Image: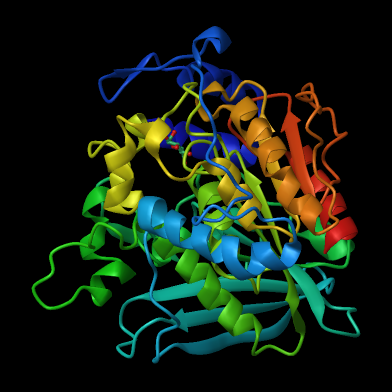
């Protein structure tokens, strides 16, 4: 129910849906655990230090960060939260079955590509849709979106192959029905001189507990291994891995400027793009929408969703490394927190988009995380919220355009049409 509401809100952005979301996003007990929404009950906490190495040395230069501290933290996040991912598969192949076809009245050229992850091409394939401005005289930067729907369901273009999606019963079905998702306005990217690409997350790994038996993670289990080890990949890492495979394709396409690719996703896919950008520095920029707990929101703040809620085996443990759950009852001892995820993107541009009534995702927790991560951006001479920055009011764009940008729209757990416009502005400045 919750997911359905979310998806509706994500693309349609209509008032009715947002109103529903506000109630839906304030559950009081989840997985048997109470949920706090009072600032005076968030608890006291000390964030683990960013700028000190594990052997206690201060980190004072960008070089020390990149050479020593960043790799340490990357390992800790892998180990404790998302899990390790395998490298590019040997048998990765691309089939461009629709090549440079005019679309949107000649404004764009379209490509549809099947990315085969394994040698056996009957399964484990990801459909990648790409539009590039037809007029472009040189390779173009683009935005790669990861979506909850097959691309033919979110883009209005009769030339698209009908994809497949996982239904509520966990079965793969043709994505030939209209959805409540609404359509994404792709032309605004083309008008701004950017390309636009999108993939369906379920092509990589289904989004339910039993999904392991169908997705890409299964093909990496060792003989006799039933499930990923405690520090191996959950579904979020699998989705992030799939995004890197899209990048592998971009690098082969001369019309795409693969050094200037931005990633965007919302909610669990906001967590995904943040992790994908951290793991794969080929991505130049990340726009993480409403990523919340397990994304950019501080875990030590007891507000809205907590690790205890998200990593409960009855909910979303399958999205993370099993180790994540070991911190559910002792978050203050966890060696990492979300400010480290944010800092791991430095010096590359990162925009955190939140919603003022998205209480479950804790927009303030994302703001505080950005403030705490800012010193790392500053090591590189990049702009980020200052230590004395105030939490911006809804729709206040004063922190948006920093290299480490933060923006909270007035509204709930969604990406509004106006948000996309701001993303394009951010891309114009930083991509
Ligand atoms: C749930 C979950 C969140 C997640 C969201 C989503 O609400 O608790 O962590 O971000 O779903 O992806 O829809």
| Label tally | 0
- Residue ID at (77%, 44%): 405
Q: Nearer the viewer, residue 149 or 257?
A: 257
Q: Where's residue 10, x and y in %? A: 59, 39
Q: Quadrant of residue 159?
A: bottom right
Q: Residue at x 34, y 57 (%)?
A: 234
Along the viewing direction, whichever of 274 and 1 lies nearer the viewer: 274
Q: Position of residue 76 (x, y in %)?
A: 43, 56
Of 49 and 324, the residue lying toward us: 49
Left or right: residue 48 compared with residue 407: left
**Residue displayed at 84% across by 46% down:** 402
As displayed, is residue 244 above or below residue 171?
A: below
Ligand 1 is found in which quarter of the picture? Answer: top left
Quadrant containing the C terminus in the rendered view: bottom right
Residue 91 in picture, x, y percent from top left: 39, 91
- Image vertical order of residue 31 relative to residue 335, above or below: above
Q: Is residue 196 left or right of residue 303?
A: right
Across and down, in percent, residue 89 comes to: 40, 85
Q: Is residue 154 above or below residue 355?
A: below
Q: Residue furthest left?
A: 224
At horizontal 60% and vertical 47% (from top left) the residue drawn is 50
Q: Would residue 183 be visible to someone looking at this image? A: no
Q: Is residue 170 left or right of residue 354?
A: left
**418 left or right of 232 in image:** right
In the image, residue 309 sits, relative to residue 109, either above or below, namely above
39 or 153: nearer the eye? 39
Quadrant for residue 118, please give it. bottom left
Can residue 3 be seen by looking at this rendering?
yes
Q: Quadrant of the N terminus?
A: top left
């Amino acid at each position: 129910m919750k997911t359905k509401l979310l998806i509706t809100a994500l693309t349609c952005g209509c008032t009715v849906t947002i109103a529903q979301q506000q109630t839906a996003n304030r559950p009081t007990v989840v997985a048997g655990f109470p949920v706090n929404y009072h600032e005076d009950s968030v608890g006291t906490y000390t964030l683990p230090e960013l700028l000190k190495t594990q052997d206690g040395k201060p980190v004072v230069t960008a070089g020390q960060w990149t050479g020593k501290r960043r790799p340490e933290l990357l390992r800790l996040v892998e180990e404790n939260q998302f899990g390790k991912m395998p490298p590019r598969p040997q048998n990765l192949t691309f089939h461009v079955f629709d090549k440079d076809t005019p679309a949107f009245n000649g404004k764009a050229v379209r490509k549809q590509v099947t990315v085969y992850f394994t040698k056996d091409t009957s399964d484990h394939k990801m459909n990648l849709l790409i539009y590039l401005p037809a007029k472009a005289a040189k390779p173009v930067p683009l935005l790669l979106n990861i979506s909850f729907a097959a691309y033919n369901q979110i883009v209005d273009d009769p030339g698209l192959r009908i994809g497949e999606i996982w239904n509520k019963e966990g079965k793969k079905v043709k994505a030939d029905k209209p959805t409540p998702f609404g359509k994404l306005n792709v032309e605004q990217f083309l008008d701004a001189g950017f390309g636009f690409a999108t993939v369906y997350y379920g092509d990589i790994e289904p989004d339910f507990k039993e999904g392991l038996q169908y997705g890409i993670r299964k093909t990496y289990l060792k003989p006799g291994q039933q499930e990923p080890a405690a520090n191996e990949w959950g579904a979020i890492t699998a989705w992030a891995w799939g995004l890197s495979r899209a990048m592998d394709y971009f690098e082969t396409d001369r019309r795409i400027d693969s050094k200037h690719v931005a990633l965007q996703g919302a909610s669990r896919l906001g967590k995904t793009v943040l992790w994908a950008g951290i793991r794969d520095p080929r991505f130049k920029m990340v726009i993480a929408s409403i990523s919340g707990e397990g994304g950019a929101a501080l875990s030590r703040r007891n507000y809205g969703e907590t690790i205890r809620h998200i990593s409960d085996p009855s909910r979303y443990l399958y999205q993370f490394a099993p180790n994540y759950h070991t911190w559910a009852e002792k978050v203050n001892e966890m060696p990492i927190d979300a400010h480290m995820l944010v800092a791991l993107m430095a010096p590359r541009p990162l925009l955190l988009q939140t919603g003022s009534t998205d209480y479950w995702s804790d927009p303030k927790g994302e703001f505080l995380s950005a403030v705490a991560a800012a010193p790392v951006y500053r090591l590189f001479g990049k702009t980020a919220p200052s230590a004395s920055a105030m939490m911006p009011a809804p729709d206040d764009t004063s922190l948006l355009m920093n290299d480490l940008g933060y923006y909270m729209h007035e509204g709930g757990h969604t990406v509004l049409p106006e948000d996309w416009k701001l993303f394009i502005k951010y891309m114009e400045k930083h991509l």
